[in-house]
């Protein structure tokens, strides 16, 4: 039988071994060899885990770069399709869709009390009652109490229903009043618009432009005025600043830096994109107004495109008109916007602008 023995436990895996030996020095050597083997095995496992984590991290970063690249390219494509998107839509207001047609919820009666709920604990008739009258008295007293409790519950239920019905009628009346007023405003707007009311025409055009959906990064706002005598609609459009538009077109993962690296458009390409966005917004705005206004109330549109800019010399911010255009209805609608580019359209309308829009050079705005 061995004189020396030792139980060893691998702290990494929990594995246990029992070592026996007659020589204490040989026992210590075996112990050291076993721990050395376990440590090498643990280090190899940690190295594998580290490699796997690194590989998974790289894969995740590359997939994120692909996702962001696809999103960036989609954003750019959306900006290039601002006008095309509008040409596929019907710009007219749908009067019927503006009507509030919701039906007020029905009145639902609460569950009434059931007599069985009160009589279920009444003792049943027993022949023993004929021999022992207290049993009968107990049953009759229980029946009396049950009837009383049931009648009280019915009274309470009737009062509660009456109160809830009163509240429901009040809420229904308020809803129908609000609904009628809302629908009347739509009817009045339609009547006013079709009869040529200046306020109604302005409100109609505002609604048309407000419901127009633009891509991310582009949020034009509009101020509308109308000269009924001259049939001229004046629109001031707040255009995006170049800094509002995305310039990144690709993302790549850099293993050396362990980060995503952005690739931006060349300056010339970005300037062309900004010019394209501005011309599309201008042409789209004119198109949406003329397409949606199905009456003969508007013959001309005067449009001024404004953008905020920062003056380097003074350090002040200002609002500059960088494009102005007068669009006669017959001239504008004679162009097929699917075949004529926005730039060609503005050229035919003799739009005023000082070269490329990215310079933000001001021009004189048109007045109604």
Image: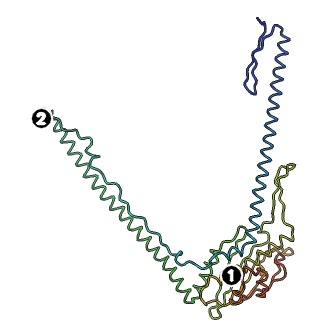
- Locate the N terminus by quadrant: top right
Which residue has dot 2 on it? 130
Measured as percent of width and height from the top left, residue 98 is found at 53, 75
Q: Cβ–Cβ below 8 Å for labels 2 and 1?
A: no
112 versus 187 height, above or below? above
Crowding at dot 1, Cα within 10 Å, few <14 / some 14-19 / many 20+, comes out as many
Compared across the picture, whether 224 is left or right of 349 comes to left
Q: Is residue 175 rendered to the left or right of residue 309?
A: left
Q: Residue furthest left?
A: 130
Which quarter of the rendered picture does the C terminus lie within? bottom right
Residue at x-position 77% and y-position 44%: 56
Residue on which disc 1 sits: 287
**33 lies above or below 76:** above
Residue 225 is drawn in which quadrant? bottom right
Residue 353 at x, y = what percent?
A: 81, 83
Q: Residue furthest front?
A: 339
Q: How is the image coloured?
A: rainbow
* N-term-proximal mark, 2 vs 1: 2
SS at badge 1: helix
| Number of marks in picture | 2
Q: How far is mark 2 from mark 1, CA to CA? A: 98 Å
Instruction: Identify the disc placed on residue 118.
Output: none
Of tags 2 and 1, which is closer to the observer? Answer: 1
**In the depicted view, which residue is nearer to us: 16 or 226?**
16
Residue 77 x, y percent position in the rendering: 75, 68
Looking at the picture, tell me which residue is in the foreground, 328 or 118.
Answer: 328
**Image quadrant of residue 293?**
bottom right
Q: Secondary structure at mark 2?
A: helix
- Residue 341, x across and y down, in percent: 77, 80
The answer to whether residue 261 is above or below residue 202 is: above
Determine whether, in the image, residue 177 is placed left or right of residue 333: left
């Amino acid at each position: 039988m061995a004189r020396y023995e030792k139980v060893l436990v691998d702290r990494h895996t929990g594995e246990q071994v029992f070592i026996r030996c007659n020589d204490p020095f040989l026992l210590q050597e075996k112990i050291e060899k076993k721990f050395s083997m376990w440590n090498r095995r643990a280090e190899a496992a940690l190295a594998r885990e580290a490699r796997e984590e690194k590989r998974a991290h790289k894969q995740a970063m590359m997939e994120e770069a692909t996702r962001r690249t696809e999103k960036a390219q989609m954003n750019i494509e959306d900006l290039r399709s601002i006008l095309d998107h509008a040409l596929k839509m019907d710009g007219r207001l749908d009067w019927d869709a503006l009507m509030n047609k919701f039906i007020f919820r029905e009145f639902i009666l609460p569950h009434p009390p059931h007599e069985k709920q009160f009589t279920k604990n009444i003792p049943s008739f027993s022949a023993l009652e004929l021999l022992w009258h207290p049993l009968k008295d107990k049953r009759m007293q229980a029946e009396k109490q049950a009837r009383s409790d049931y009648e009280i519950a019915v009274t309470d239920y009737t009062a509660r229903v009456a109160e809830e019905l009163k509240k429901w009628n009040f809420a229904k009346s308020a809803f129908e009043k609000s609904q009628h007023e809302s629908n009347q405003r739509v009817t009045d707007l339609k009547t006013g618009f079709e009869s040529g009311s200046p306020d109604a025409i302005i409100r109609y055009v505002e609604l048309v432009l407000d419901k127009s959906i633009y891509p991310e990064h582009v949020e034009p706002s509009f101020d509308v005025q109308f000269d009924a005598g001259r049939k001229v609609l004046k629109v001031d459009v707040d255009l995006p600043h170049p800094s509002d538009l995305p310039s990144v077109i690709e993302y790549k993962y850099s293993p050396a830096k362990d980060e995503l690296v952005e690739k931006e458009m060349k300056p010339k390409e970005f300037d062309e994109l900004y010019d394209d966005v501005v011309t599309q917004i201008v042409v789209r705005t004119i198109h949406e107004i003329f397409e949606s206004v199905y009456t003969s109330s508007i013959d001309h549109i005067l449009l001024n495109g404004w953008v905020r800019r920062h003056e380097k010399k003074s350090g002040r911010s200002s609002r500059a008109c960088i494009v102005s255009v007068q669009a006669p209805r017959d001239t504008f609608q004679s162009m097929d916007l699917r075949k004529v580019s926005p730039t060609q359209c503005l050229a035919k309308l003799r739009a005023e602008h000082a070269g490329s829009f990215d310079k933000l050079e001001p021009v004189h705005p048109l007045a109604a």
